[in-house]
């Protein structure tokens, strides 16, 4: 007998933007073909977002999806998304780039040092 659908608390929050992350990787030549000195894959822009709230949600969704892809082992990537910008036609756009996880970790160490208590986010820190 087939199982039912996944429980609602396990469902990924919309919007799921994995296809945007994979497109950035593919435009750079594929997984592992990042820029040799920065670790960046291709820069992309999501345009046509109606308002600032939607643009902010897309920015958060990009980070969620990159984390999901890394956690599931699909791609060892991180995300760098700029602040949403307002276009001349009144819509918003989000410019982002996918970064190889090794380079992302090195950037955090270079900026904040080895002391994890000074990091803005420590993935090994226990939640309160």
Image (spheres, rainbow, N blue to C red):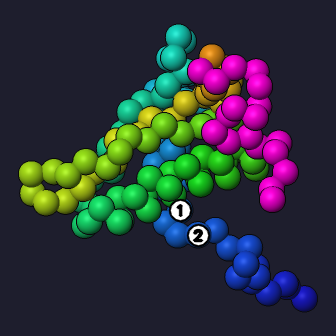
- Whether residue 6 sits left or right of residue 57 in the image: it is right
Which residue occupies the extreme top position in the image?
A: 37
Q: Which residues are magenta?
A: 111-128
Q: Residue at x 51, y 17 (%)?
A: 38
| Outermost residue to the left | 88
The residue carrying pointer 1 sits among few (fewer than 14), some (14 to 19) or many (20 or more) residues within 10 Å by Cα, namely: few
Quarter where residue 8 is shown: bottom right
Q: Position of residue 18 (x, y in %)?
A: 54, 53
**Tag nearer the camera, 1 or 2:** 2
Membership of 61 in magenta stretch: no
- The answer, for residue 29, to whether it is visible in the render is no
Q: Quadrant of the C terminus?
A: bottom right
> Which numbered marker is on residue 73?
none
Front residue of 122 and 62: 122
In this rendering, the answer to whether 119 lies above or below 52 is: above
Instruction: Please identify the quarter of the rendering in which residue 50 is found.
Output: bottom left
- Please give the label number shown on residue 13: 2
| Secondary structure under the numbered disc 1 in the rendered image | loop
Which residue does the image show at 55% across and 30% down from the upper left? Answer: 99
Locate residue 84, reporting x and y percent.
32, 49
Q: Dot 2 surroundings within 10 Å: few (below 14), some, or many (20 or more)?
A: few
Mark number displayed over residue 16: 1
Q: Is residue 92 visible?
A: yes
Residues tagged 1 and 2 counted as in contact (Cβ below 8 A): yes
């Amino acid at each position: 007998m087939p199982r039912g659908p996944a429980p609602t608390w396990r469902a990924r929050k919309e919007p799921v933007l994995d296809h945007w992350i994979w497109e950035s990787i593919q435009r750079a030549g594929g997984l592992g073909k990042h820029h040799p000195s920065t670790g960046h894959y291709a820069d992309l822009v999501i345009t046509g977002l109606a308002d600032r709230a939607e643009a902010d949600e897309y920015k958060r969704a990009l980070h969620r999806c990159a984390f999901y892809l890394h956690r599931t082992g699909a791609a060892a990537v991180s995300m760098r998304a700029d602040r949403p910008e307002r276009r001349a036609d009144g819509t918003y756009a989000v410019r982002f780039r996918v970064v190889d996880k090794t380079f992302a970790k090195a950037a955090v160490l270079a900026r904040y040092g080895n002391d994890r208590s000074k990091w803005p986010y420590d993935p090994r820190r226990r939640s309160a």
